Image (spheres, rainbow, N blue to C red):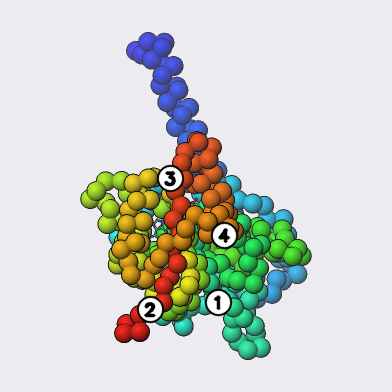
Amino acid sequence: MPKPHQVQVVKDKETQLREQRDAESKRKAYREVKEETRKKHKSVTFEASPTPEEPVSDKISLPRKRYYRQRAHSNPFSDHRLEYPRSPDDMNWEKLFPKFYDEESNSMTSSVEIADIGCGYGGLLTKLAPEFPEKLILGMEIRVQVTQYVEDRIIALRNKHENDEVNFQNISVLRGNAMKFLPNFFRKGQLSKMFFCFPDPHFKQRKHKARIITNTLLSEYAYVLREGGVVYTITDVEDLHKWMVKHLEEHPLFERLDEEWEKQDKCANIMYNSTEEGQKVTRNKGSKWIACYRRLPTPEDCV
Ligand SMILES: C[S@@+](CC[C@H](N)C(=O)[O-])C[C@H]1O[C@@H](n2cnc3c(N)ncnc32)[C@H](O)[C@@H]1O
């Protein structure tokens, strides 16, 4: 027979389990509704007109992060069964930026120029949107549920601001592994800005190869970045900052921009304060290190 205090412990565990199950089914139900909305929104936006019986709700609320929980890290070397185009020409950008698609000419009126690599929950995208209304800005994120959160956030913002000057039609998000498939999405010299905000630090030495800035990857970034384009980096991990600076310094196609430049550049300022990770660092009174590099012209004999 369990003693009275043991019964209490058992009951507590049962309660805990029940609460966990309740929370999980609540999360599941919430995500199912959002999934439906995403599908409906996409099919409405990309494939058909809304039927009178099924009008598109203009009351899509902003998503709640707690329903999109996922492990903190994703292994960039795993096979994530990601979808990616065979080449940039095979990419259907109109699905992501429908308002920048011209039906008459059957082509996009603009192409993605700014990329937020490992965009997390999309804070930077939403802050850049009003600053560059004519430019297309893409977040690339490897984690499924985090990407879905950003998708839902953008759907909600577009709906809420449908008739406003800033209508968030110029930002979008894509699930992808930036360490593997960037040249499948972007043509040579397509991008003018690439952001690497608070990338995963991969502290252990044997994990350093998983860092998003390496010599090989910098050559890919230099390929998709136009001459004069800028790589922005920010981190709260000093060791990672030094690593990124070292690799960028060693690369012949990048040149560091000085502090004066950082101070007057609006994107450097936005990046400092707008990402979710950056805000967390501010709340915890941590330090932030920035390094920005300009893409140099490719030497004649390498063109
Ligand atoms: C620490 S978070 C920072 C998120 C965001 N940039 C911010 O500042 O709030 C790093 C993000 O990069 C994503 N990530 C890591 N490796 C990636 C890769 N190879 N391709 C795309 N995203 C990646 C992670 O899933 C994670 O959301």
Query: Can you identify the residue that label 2 sits on?
Result: 298
Query: Can you identify the residue that label 3 sits on?
Result: 236
Whether residue 269 is situated above or below residue 24 in the rendered picture: below
The span from disc 2 to disc 1 (Cα, nearest Å) is 22 Å
Label 1 CA crowd tier, 10 Å (few <14, some 14–19, many 20+): some
Judging depth in this view, the residue of 106 and 207 nearest the camera is 207
The amino acid pointed to by label 3 is: Asp
Dots 4, 2 in contact, CB < 8 A: no
The amino acid pointed to by label 1 is: Ser
Query: Can you identify the residue that label 4 sits on?
Result: 265
Q: Which mark is residue 111?
A: 1
Regarding residue 38, the answer to whether it shows in the image is: yes
* Sooner in the amino-acid sequence: mark 4 or mark 2: 4
* Sooner in the amino-acid sequence: mark 2 or mark 3: 3
Label 3 CA crowd tier, 10 Å (few <14, some 14–19, many 20+): many
Whether residue 290 is situated above or below residue 12 in the rendered picture: below
Report the quarter where the C terminus lies: bottom left
